[in-house]
Amino acid sequence: MERLHWVRHRCRQLLAADSGRGWYSNPNEPPSKAAAVDAGRRSGGKRRTVYARYGPHQTQWEVLTKKYPGNGIRTTKYSLLTFIPVNLFQQFRRVANLYFLFLALLNWVPVVEAFEKEITMIPLVVVLVVIGIKDALEDYRRYLFDKKINNNVARVFCGSQRAYVDRRWEQVRVGDLVRLSCNQIIPADLLLLSSSDPRGVCYIETSNLDGESNLKQRQVVPDANAANANAANAQNSEFCPESFSGRIECENPNEDLARFRGYMERPGGARVGLHQQNLLLRSCRVRNTETVVGIVVYAGHDTKAMMNNSGPRYKRSRLEKRLNTDVLWCVVLLAVMCLTAAVGHGLWLRNLQNPGLQGDPVFQVDGETSPALAGFQVFWTMIIVLQVLIPISLYVSIEIVKLVQIYFIHQDLDLHQQHQDSGVQCRALNITEDLGRVQFLFSDKTGTLTENQMVFRRCSIFGVEYPHRDNALRLQVYESQRGEAPGRPPTLRSVCSRKSLSCRSLSCNRSSVSLHTLTAESEDEDPPETTGAFCSRMAKDVVPDPDLVRKLSWLCWSGSAPPGGGGAQTQTQNQTQTQNQTQNQTQNQTQTQNQTQNQTQTQTQTSSPSSLELSCITDFFLALAVCNSVVVSSPGQPGHAVPEVQPPLRSLEEIRLMFQRLSFPPQIRGSPRGLAGRLFARKTGGLAVTTAEPGAGPEPGAGPDTGNPEDSSIEGPEDQNTEHQRPEDDPDQDNDDDLLYEAESPDEAALVHAARAYGCTLRCRSARSLLVDLPGIGSLAVSLLHVLPFDSNRKRMSVVVRHPLTGEVVVYTKGADSAIMDLAETPKGAEQSDVYNHVRDQTQNHLDTYAREGLRTLCIAKKVLDQDQYESWLKGQVLAESSIENRDELLLESAQRLETELTLLGSTGIVDRLQEDVPETIEALQGAGIRVWVLTGDKQETAVNVANACRLIRPNDQLMTLNCESKDACAALLEQLNLEVQGAENGPRDPVGDAPGPHGDGPGSVLVIDGRTLDWALQDGLQSSFLDLSRRCRAVICCRSTPLQKSQVVRLVRDRLGVLTLAVGDGANDVSMIQVADVGVGISGQEGMQAVMASDFAVSRFRHLRKLVLVHGRWCYHRLANMILYFLYKNVMYVNLLFWYQFFCGFSGSVMINSWVLILFNLAFTSVPPLVFGVLDQDTPAQTLLRVPELYRDLQTSQVYVPSTFWVSVLDAFYQSLVCFFVPYFALAGSDVGDLSFGSPINASALLVILLHQVIMSNTLTWIHGVVLLASAGSYFVFVVLFSRFCRTCSHPTNPLGVETLELARPGFYLIVGLTVVTALLPRFLFRVLHRTLHPSAALRSAQRDEADSERYRRRMQRWNQKHPRTGRVPVCADNPGLEPGLDPGPDQVRS
Amino acid sequence: MMASSYNAKEEDGHISGTSNHGGAGTVKTRKPDNTAFKQQRLPAWQPILTAGTVLPAFFVIGLIFIPIGIGLYVTSNNIKEFEIDYTGVETSNPCYNCAKNFSWNSTTPCNCSMSFTLEQPFESNVYMYYGLSNFYQNHRRYVKSRDDSQLNGDQSSLTNPSKECEPYRTSEGLPIAPCGAIANSLFNDTLELYHIDSNGTRTLVHLVKKGIAWWTDKHVKFRNPGVNSNLTAIFQGTAKPVNWRKPVYELEPLDSENNGFINEDFIVWMRTAALPTFRKLYRIIHKKPNTTPTLPSGKYVLEVTYNYPVLSFDGRKRMILSTISWMGGKNPFLGIAYITVGSICFFLGVVLLIIHHKYDTRSNSADIPN
């Protein structure tokens, strides 16, 4: 299907009338700009009012809504009747066709007519017919698709039948009420009015739209049912379609998928704000919800899905730009030649009309024309005669060649990723050759260099670091398993199999394959398994840190004093109620009890948590579990939606009491209960913790615990196995493992899994509340007041919840450390401000440590709001939410208002492993002379560390850090560093211009710059010195950069240095960068498809870049460049033959070659060889290119297609045409040769010269070359012989009858052709021989080596590699197995 | 376009959602085929053009070309050729008066005779050409000005000639046959050759008119219209070309096989020359059956009926007598060129040999780029 897509894209581009690919048309405006303007105009314009079709407002519907377009779509361009005129019109909007048409029309003017009228029509007709057929097929296919789509069936409410009836999609109108059930595709943009889900939510999967397979939650319009005039008890009653009487006002259709604004007015006049959360988008799929009902607001082409269907992007490759200038040179050449002929004819004519001579010459047909006029006429005639010089067919040839090149790239096995079964995908189809000239590579870090499989690694809470050593070991195990993929320990497999079974059932149930989720256990399973997004096994199984478990266990003890499972809680309530009355007392007690606790614990534990710390830990995990947008689904449940909270909601009062009790020191400390306790107990074997005493009193969890067979198979971490943690072992919650988290980002999933490992399990999520298990407490419903989603400006997200235990309104914020640390303050009125300061400092230290290890850090903070604060903020928020016009800005402002004065809870470190072969790839790319820049949003230390790990920074590199507080400081520092680098350059090494040493053996400089400084560096004044500096550096690492900065950097480098840039990224934050770069590569990773959608090429792994750039890029460039040069050469060479003849026919525009042969020479006889040349030629074998990346530099330095090579080609063409013309001329001059007999050897030798020229230029010749070359020559001779045999009176001025048959029987013919061919090819041949002998390029040398001693060479390279050890990774990997590059097999490392 | 791709995607979802998931075994992988063509590993011959590898080619070319060249040169030199200019530009020229007083319409033919001496006897068949200089028979407008259908005997074209023939399409309301500028400017000098033997007697050299045109032209391309041989009747209602003295059916009234459009002189003229200086075959002097040379050495007289004007374009008229060989007429160029190119190749071969010994070994010991 993919292939079909690109073929169709390709075709479309080929055919698109307004694609602007003509050689003198302006480059296309980026379509987005126009679209943006359009959108702006629209959004400012009128609104759309929608009434229900069969509701009480049926009359209004008739008036208003009926005018809106229906849901049928028509993407075809033509109908049966209009095809020919419209298609012709479209085609003649192309410059090339206009040129043909112009020539054809010119030929109709009698005085300038050069050929028969039909003959000049041939190229035009051929092009028109070919493209017309393609267009027709294309359109027919579109028509079939449309028909199929339009005939899909949806259940639509029908007023007359008072029921939902089946309607075809195209019959659906705006205002119709549509009922959809699970897994159905949404037929139009619907406003969600009712859902079978009691919480009024609905899940949709948008993979048809943006490729993201995680579920997105949509919300029923609040009180939609209240809009039903007669439905009193709105919430519970079935939605009543007949009486829906709301009036919906929304903005006019636009293509912004993430925006929908409007309001619904109820009969009473009350308005409900509508936003994107209420909109079901066309072509998405309903999931996890049994039935939903929605009203159509946008139908057919108005839907956001359809409006987003813009065509593929058209990028102009540099080669094409180069080509266009050369084509312009061809135009100039043509003009010069025609002018020469015109002037020559004028002079010749004047000479002839010399009054000294008597009378008119007998051969002059028209003696009256003045020389000037005749010269003018000849000018136009010559344009027709020499038309081939303008290589219009070259453009078609290039299209074809690129098509095949892309086909080959698609077919490359090495670029195919086994696990995902996805290969490379070429989306922009006309810049393949730009891959061959990349000079700067800008890479995102996360998901591009790394796996983007976030795994919780360690955390720091309340200033205490929990190293999670076992977790590290576990990660190492995964690492080693990846190294030895097939041989997986059987124990692990048994553990997995249960998982994968559940996964399989799940994926069947969901009936969709989310292609971009890569699960660890699927690696060697067949067929590939899929689970929800970001829930790989590695991420799921976090091994808790014993210290933290111990501390958490305090919580459990305090939380589950009384025996008995469910009854315990009620009893607890009783207890806490009593304590409630002595609230003040208890608070006072806390401190003292804490102390006693400390004292009592000193024998068993080194430290015991203070109540503050304990509540911090609780909050921390609660925040991890709550502060996210993770959607929970569980395959065990019928609708996939986790049912409503099972235990009845506790009253606020009860919860508050419970929480207060938490502050008490544990009374029964010997009996660990609940999850944490059991966890702890399980750990004892491996961790030598002795706290676990036999429980006093009955243990509720004991029975199921021992009774669970799986748990008995647990082995210690020394066995390099992961435990299968089962946080909850309640028998009635057996489906616990099947909880499936679908997160928008992998970090979120990792954190939720981490929280779950500590027993803090997110069980269920609805729009209003979350169900969270807390260790020792059980399920709690946390009412969710607001979610302030993540955005890249704030770099954080927040949730506002009512705390389940205290009842306070609490804001949990999670975000980048820079964002949080600045906002974190000591809570007002807190006595222990020094404690908080200490926590801050410690956490900062830990953050730095994490970052140095290459971990991704996130900070967690909270803020308690009192009711007044909350109320006042709420007002602003509601206002912001309900505003239609500048809602986004208001929301941002409101969020910023809330996220202040945060209390820091702790931080997390998340591991993201490097992808396999990343260091090798980067090394190869650098070896190829490509500067690699890393642009990341991560912390500086993280970025540097990852750069180390992937060998972007080598051990003896000079690291220059650019962190400044002000612009002036930045300028000064830049200046200083510039001097430093210059000094270093001039000192030990020879100044080699701006390029660092070829293979970078000498110490290079690496610039590290952070986001804020980058802002200054990108400003006007500092741009040039920043560029100066970065140009001297081997690598540049930009940390903390925003998406906008990323694109600014790319644009700066691209424009100011004038180099060819490649940007690679995987996420939405890389989209702008990918779009700005000359070549954008998207990695179809974990973060949806936005990057891929924006990219020109999509690969699945970073390492694929190596072959894509080094081999395919080079090949494509070489092939295309050589083909273009050859094509131009061919045209110039052939056309010149005709030009030389003008000197002997009075510049009259006469030709000595039959006009059919003349036209077909380019169109048929010599059209295929350049294609084969452009498709199959390999200047260097792939292996050599991969092995010796230095070869890539040839392209950057001595480029194949530069003005000099073009002019050399043209000169060669001139020489060859001179030989081809004048050898026959001198051999036949003065004889009785007729004009066609004279042209015959010229044409034959020109053909042979052109074909053999290609043989000389080719680097490889296969049987295909042979066949094509022979067929080309053969077809020519067969054609001319047949033509000269049977063409009795045809082809008027140049009737070929008998010419060729006679010529081919003449020995002189062969003598002339032989001499001509040898003489014409001699210089090019000699040049090539001498060039290769005297200046053997690296490419050739390696090719020779290939033949001579490939084995010896391989060994030498190996030795060489060993001499240059890959020391870069050492600092990272000692402690952090996750960053170990995947190539080196792990076992010995794990053992050590 | 994109719209349909989205549709396709949607449809994709349909398929995978309904059918594909049922049977996991039927899941088709998108893995490309591992074939030599698709993986671009076709066995290929890499022409490595270095001095060492192409050395033999140069020597071989040299060794082939030089003998060919010598052969051609010798052959060309063996061809005998005699040329005489009878334009009459110089006052000393016997045809001076005829040239001066030329008029297309003059009814009295102007005759002049040129005498010349052949130093050497001409063996074998001798071809008699007339040569014109500065005559642009390849001028675009001139070349076009003919009607091939008419010449091929097409009746309708006879009465209604092609527009291409303008302005020689009609004359006084009648269609011209043969129409067009080429036909109109038919070379109409008559040349006769007399041998003057040692005792002063003039013997007419027998000039053969037939066999001078291409076989295909004579039998395929040019045909007289109509079936009956009465050309006069057929050409009734047509006019003769403006410059002609007699109509086309009187070109060779005695020989119906050489009259009308299939008159060989006419056919030869109609095959336009490639270059402004050209010769056209006029007559053939067949070799005599006995051993005496076709044209023995001695004095000859060329009797010219001077009809054709060339002074208007500064042209020249010549009469050429030539024997021919297997490779055509006398032209030393090919032989010399072959010898030159062959020598150059040989020389280059030697140069490459030196280069090869000096440089080619270097690349073998090339070090790894560092």
Image (tube, coloured by chain):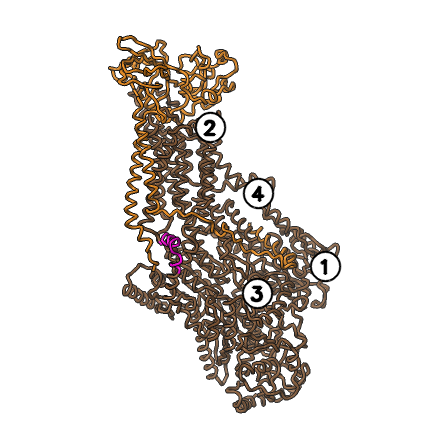
Chain colours: A brown, B orange
Chain holding disc 1: A
- Residue A986 visible in the snapshot: yes
Q: Position of residue A124 (x, y in %)?
A: 49, 37
- Above or below for B120 versus A282: above
Q: Which mark is residue A1284?
A: 2
Q: Of residues B368 and A969, which is closer to you in this image?
A: B368
Q: Of residues A186 and A1135, which is closer to you in this image?
A: A1135
- Residue A1026 visible in the snapshot: no
Task: Magenta stretch: give its range.
Answer: A1338-1354
Q: Which mark is residue A136?
A: 4
Cα distance in 3D space between marks 2 and 3: 69 Å
Corner quadrant of residue A222? bottom right
Cα distance in 3D space between marks 2 and 4: 37 Å
SS label for mark 4: helix
First in residue order: circle 2 vs circle 3: 3
- Give the residue type at disc 2: Ser
- Give the residue type at disc 3: Ser
Given contact means CB atoms under 8 Å apart, are the residues at marks 2 and 3 in contact?
no
Chain holding disc 4: A
